[in-house]
Image (cartoon, coloured by chain):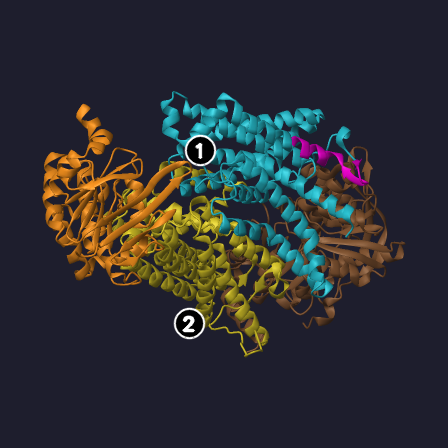
Chain colours: A orange, B brown, C yellow, D cyan
Amino acid sequence: MTDPLLKLSDLNKSFGALKATDNVSLTLMPGEIHALIGPNGAGKSTLIKQVAGGLRSDSGTVEFAGRDVTPLGTVARARAGLGRTFQISSLAMEYTVLQNTVLGALGHDGAVMRFFRPVMKDRALVDRGMAALERVGLADQAAKRTADLSHGQRRLLEVAVALTLEPKVFLMDEPMAGLGASGSKRLTGFLDDLRAQAPILLVEHDMDAVFALADRISVLVYGQVIATGTADEIKRDAAVREAYLGAEDAA
Amino acid sequence: MKLKSLIAAASIAALSAGMAYAEAHGGKVKVGMITTLSGGGAGLGLDVRDGFVLAAKGNENLELVIEDDQRKPDIAVQLADKLIQSEKVDVMTGIIWSNLAMAVVPAVTAQGKFYLSPNAGPSALAGKGCSPFYFNVAWQNDAFYEASGSWASENGIEKVFLMAPNYPAGTDGMTGFKRTFTGEVVDEVYTKLGQTDYAAEIAQIRASDADTVYFFLPGGMGISFMKQYAGSGVDKKVMGPAFSFDQGILGAIGDAALGVKNTSHWSKDIDNEANKKFVADFQAEYGRLPSLYAAQGYDTALLLQSAMGKADVKDAAAFQAALEEADFASVRGAFAFAPNHHPIQDIYMREVVKEGDIVTNKIIGVAASNHQDVYGADCKM
Amino acid sequence: MTRETFLNVILFAILPVTALAAFALDEPFIITLATKAAILALAGVGLNIALGLGGLVSFGHAAFFGLGGYAMGILASHAQSYTPLMETPFLIEGTKSMLVIWGVAIIAAALAALAIGALSLRTTGVYFIMITLAFGQMLYYFAISWPAYGGEDGLSIYIRNDFPGLNTLDPIQFFAIAFGVLAIVLFGAGRLAKAPFGLALSAARQNAERVETVGLTPFRIRLVAFVISGAVTGLAGALFADLNRFVSPTMFSWHTSGEIMIFVILGGVGRLFGPVAGAALFILLEHTLGGISEFWQVYLGLLLLGVVLFARGGLIGTIAGREVAHD
Amino acid sequence: MSLILLIEQVLNGLQFGVMLFLMAAGLTLIFGVMGLINLAHGSLYMVGAFAAAAVAGWTGSFALALVAALAAAAAAGALVELLVIRRLYDRDHLDQVLATFALILIFSEGTRWLFGSFPLFLDVPAALAGPVMLPGGILYPLYRLVIIGVGLLVALGLFWLIAKTRIGVQIRAGEADREMIAALGVDISKLYTLVFALGAALAGLAGALVGAIQSVQVGMGEPVLILAFVVIVIGGIGSIKGALVGSLLVGLTDTLGGVLLPPLLGIFMQASSATSVGSAVASMAIYILMVGVLLFKPSGLFGGT
């Protein structure tokens, strides 16, 4: 058996009396999509932040590609190869779509202390930015101002920026949100292929997408992982049905 | 190249540029006045201006251009450039503050223009930095302090507490006082420039065994200190230079200033014809009592006009000689220039009294007669 | 050519055209005013790198402006009096060479910006505004109470410093120097804004989290921007001191910081030529209103108020359209 | 230095702090509720002092003068809010800085237009003049004790206002979330005018009270304004408690720094240079304090995140 690329061990995080992350352990294997689901307020976003480095854990460790990255911050983890997308689009809104992906390519190179040659005339960077846009289907929007994009297009741009980073692991926080049925379907197909490039830890509300994509699913309730397994195992799991799917069935 | 020759080179360049305009003026003199007319220190500038205008009233040969420096040195320097380059003035005057004078005067005199100082007499301009074109019609900065020091020594004051803002005019003033004072200085305190609350210093004064407080706090700082001192119940005697007890300021301090001794070269009760006329005319013209700044502005205009009567301003040497004579009836009485172009004059001791409802100053004696500054020795003209 | 580019060309031409016209009409003071506008615009261009591109609202740029001024004042005064600046451990002499003085001013301001920036950039928002103000005030009070170089009286230099091949005392030649520096810096700032560094800096202003996520450190980028910004403003300070042949602690006062900021806002934050427009307009107003009334600052205040309330995006924003160009 | 003198100086520091609090409270309130950087707050302080001096001059009554100061500053504040400030809430801080800087120019020179260029007379009322003997043999000016008292009353009043009244609830809600309180049906623009006028009135009161022992002159508000900003930044912007603590810290640092530093340095160096270096460092002391606080607490002592 191969080693996991990403390994969370006994992560904890409390905000005052609220235990947002409660002894969470999970792994992400090469080539897999591991989906993280759970009702609102279950602590999914908190966990993603702990993995990405934006939030310091109270205890527990994050290992990435065999290396303990727990003490590192967002920047160092990004440089190590964690590519993250945000639940609420986090883009440079004044910039064009292409400028956002070029920023990603620039971040991947790290050679930011260059003061003279126009970045948008740097062929290598622009080509990589363009390529990422083409992969998510935003190439025709490249010159548009990001603030003028539709909500769904911004979600795609989030993914495109993450692609420019050529990460070893993707952390995606609800990439389908607001995409609409056809958009979701397209992105689902895209992510399906993407796992070959790098495994994905996917937080998602769209159950069709999750069940279609995920190799494994972990269910998070009140900060705890109550079950991990394949789609079928999760669908059959009594605890999950009661805590989570039960509510949806009733609805 | 030496500094002096550099300056000379600069003045030759400027002079030759100025030659072309000499004809245009004839016997007239164009005066550029840069003074503070807006912002917090505007009261002093207004008085200098009003005094000058009053004395120059009706003189058609004197053309006056007035500019507001906002009490900013860089603005003052640029205005001086403007007056010299664009307005082609012959004589400049008006600056209130030492730091502005230091910024402007050397450049003005280097370009061969006369500068008559109606206030501000920094020591550098009286000593090493003196110039044939620079005349101080007010005082060298140390004058009032030195006079205070000698008066205090002669009038039984033994232990003083010195206080001034922590900037050159403040430390220089206290140095001037110590130069002539023979008693003991029990403590010296230098406060923050612009400080408004003096509770801490007053407590130090109370705790000290000084019999007299000698302070220099110009403008609002002095007003604040005197009001707070009066309310503190400390009953040590208070002395200072006239700047903190001038007419414009006494109105804001009120009774709290009564009894304070201060040194000045002018007071509205100096008994001579010129002064009586000045005080009466000023009140008639502007409806307020004149201040010492007004008196200085007035004397500056008198001096200038006395020289205009004797020489053409285009003949710099002759005009300089005419100014040196100081042949005018000063509101201060006897007035002459020392070789460094700074005044030789009596410095009086005044006391703040109440005349009717008005708090004002009264002369109680001469603190230093024919006072002359100590920097003249360094002046090589 | 976009509207803003067209406007920039006009703005760029305004100062030299004014100066040359004044030269032809023999109005040297107008040349001096144009020079002052060019120098203050330079200070504004410096601030705009931090403020416009980086979103770093520094209320303490007077610190760098003043350091540049004092670099000039101290070096030139030692050269005038033939006293060395320092004898041990090694000899440092004063100088009247403008180029050397600029170098010293830039380095001094950059070092100060490095120290101030490293401490201040730990804070954000209003706290950043106020902590930079605090550093400016510290230097202001230090300059006032430090007697060696004139304290509040300041330092007079009498003669402008030397520039190879030019007579710096001639207003039009000094204008040429100041404008030349402004032109070079404007070109550099324009390139900087479009370079990889500018992309990252501006992105950090728009969304710091995004910049971190692509693996870049906003703190480092901002600090470098702050240092460049301070260095440019320091250079402007040295030129300003040379213009007046005088330095004083006023250059360190919070009013100076405020004025530099006003040039930037008046012209249009983040616009390359904003500070040029702002400084030129401010000086024009100051110069013309002064003749109208003793209380001209009331009118100045009303005009500024009008610009903020009704001309959003500053002058350039109003004329050329709201959006900052991006290509 | 004797212990008595030290205690007296501590008292002076507290008193100076309370004076600053009167000014800083309004500033921090306005900032906290509306997110507005108001550089013109010092002008409202000046308006209060001038109104008090004018009314005291006409009527001879200090009480009427205080009322006039409150009324004039509140009216000026409300007017400014209605005409200018309310257009600035959704702007960034830069526009606010420029607009309120313009207001300073208008207020300062406008006041000089109305009242002339010379400082005005405003004195402590006879009943409060002179010193009183405190336990321990400290002779202390009565009026300064009154200022301490008024300042503490204002602090209590503000705590009460914010914690217990309907307006306070609205203010706290407004600090948290503007849309939310608008959704609750509170007339937000009226609330803002009210808060601004209240802040202005506090500044005016400070101006009148302090004007009686300082110089009532154009530009008097600016040094205090900078100090007040230092105070609220140290305390944490928007926090009344922070403003109180910050005021006292700044008051004590400034007073004791000026008193203690020169003799302290005298231990290490010559007396004359100790005096000048000590004075220089003392005038920088509060800014050093502020930088120190912000390095450890980047949002001030009681500021949110």
Kind of residue at disc 2? Leu
Where residue A241 sits in the image (x, y, percent)?
A: 20, 31
Residue C261 located left or right of residue C326: right
The subunit carrying tag 2 is C
Residue C198 - label: none
Q: Nearer the viewer, residue B147 or C117?
A: C117
Query: Could you tell whether B275 is left or right of C258 in the image?
Result: right
Q: Judge the density around disc 1: few (<14), some (14-19), many (≥20) Cα neighbours within 10 Å.
A: many
Please say if B102 is above or below D289.
Answer: below
The label shown at residue D34 is: 1
Which segment did they paint magenta? D131-150
Residue D123 seen in the current view: no
Picture coordinates of residue B346 (x, y %)? Answer: 81, 56
| Quarter of the figure with residue C183 | bottom left
Place of residue B100 in the rendered image (x, y in percent of width and height, measured from the top left) = 60, 56
Residue at x 53%, y 70% (from the top left corner): C76
Q: Which residue is mark 2?
A: C166
Tell me the element at label 2.
Answer: loop
**Quadrant assignment, res B375:** bottom right
Report, in whole angstroms, how far the alpha carbon at label 2 lies from the one at label 1.
54 Å
Residue A91 inside the magenta-drawn segment: no
Is residue A20 positioned above or below D174 on the image? below
Look at label 1 and name its amino acid.
Met
Numbered-mark total: 2
Residue C57 lies, in percent from the top left, at 42, 49
Vertical comparison of D97 with B131: above or below: above
Q: Nearer the viewer, mark 2 or mark 1?
A: 1
